Image (spheres, helix red, strand yellow):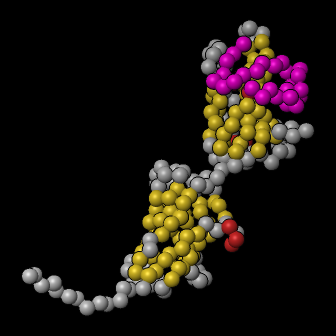
Amino acid sequence: MYRLKQHIIHFSLAILLAVLAVANASAQIVIQECDTMTFSVTSRPNIPETHFVWGIYNASPGPTDVLDPATTLDPALYFVDAQYAGSTVEVTGLAPGKYYVRIHVWDEVSCTDNIEMYLMTVLESDLDMEVYADSVCIGDPTNVYIRFAGIGPYTVTYTIGDAVTPSVFNLNGEVVGPEITIPVMEILPEGETTFWVIRVEDGCKAYEYPESERPSTGIVIFPKPAQQPIYIKEEN
């Protein structure tokens, strides 16, 4: 018998299809979309690397292995560098959903033949951000700020007011929880002008916002204070 770094169930080859249908909930793994999961066997170092073979199955009534040429999954992507054999492999790039991850290991010396199964849930990536702006007097410089809860880089496509052509702001580098500052270059009229986020792209994917759901903030422009006479107070 061998051990993995994750929760484990042991099965024989004869009941593989039954395993796919009734994977035990205690063997569930949950990762975020675009994350990379490392699977590694931590025991039985005497077993040759070629005797560890991994597979990913669609969680469906008719599961299909990622290594099956008929499937739409690409082993070169989902098994990093297509290394789906060996005591350690990495899995990445799976679309949100549920999958079965299988490892088949056999030991010719001890005459053992085992399969371990995991139920893996890939959660859809979400974007957490806050948009706000300065309120200033007309003619004064103003900025819009976007605070992200994730990790950069970020590319933001936005519009201000009735602008037809969107603008783009790029934040490079893997910055944790960054706040970006977008200078408003044009002179805005008195009152409130809306800043809309149209699209954000991070290190995982692009988030497109329909017109009715665009994150936004109001940029409030106040009139200049009216001029008043200046009085000099005389001391008694």
Residue appearing at x 80%, y 48% in the figure: 72
Left or right: 40, with 100 as reference point: left
Residue 118 x %, y %: 75, 29
Q: Which residues are magenta?
A: 1-26
Residue appearing at x 22%, y 88% in the figure: 230
Q: Quadrant of residue 11?
A: top right
Q: For this rendering, which residue is in front, 236 or 162?
A: 236
Left or right: 59, with 208 as reference point: right
Q: Quadrant of the C terminus?
A: bottom left
State yes or no: residue 221 in magenta: no
Residue 14 x %, y %: 89, 20
Q: For this rendering, which residue is in front, 160 or 134?
A: 134
Q: Residue furthest top?
A: 110
Residue appearing at x 44%, y 82% in the figure: 222
Residue appearing at x 16%, y 84% in the figure: 233
State yes or no: residue 12 in magenta: yes
Residue 234 x %, y %: 12, 84
Q: Quadrant of residue 51?
A: top right
**Is 172 situated above or below 36?**
below
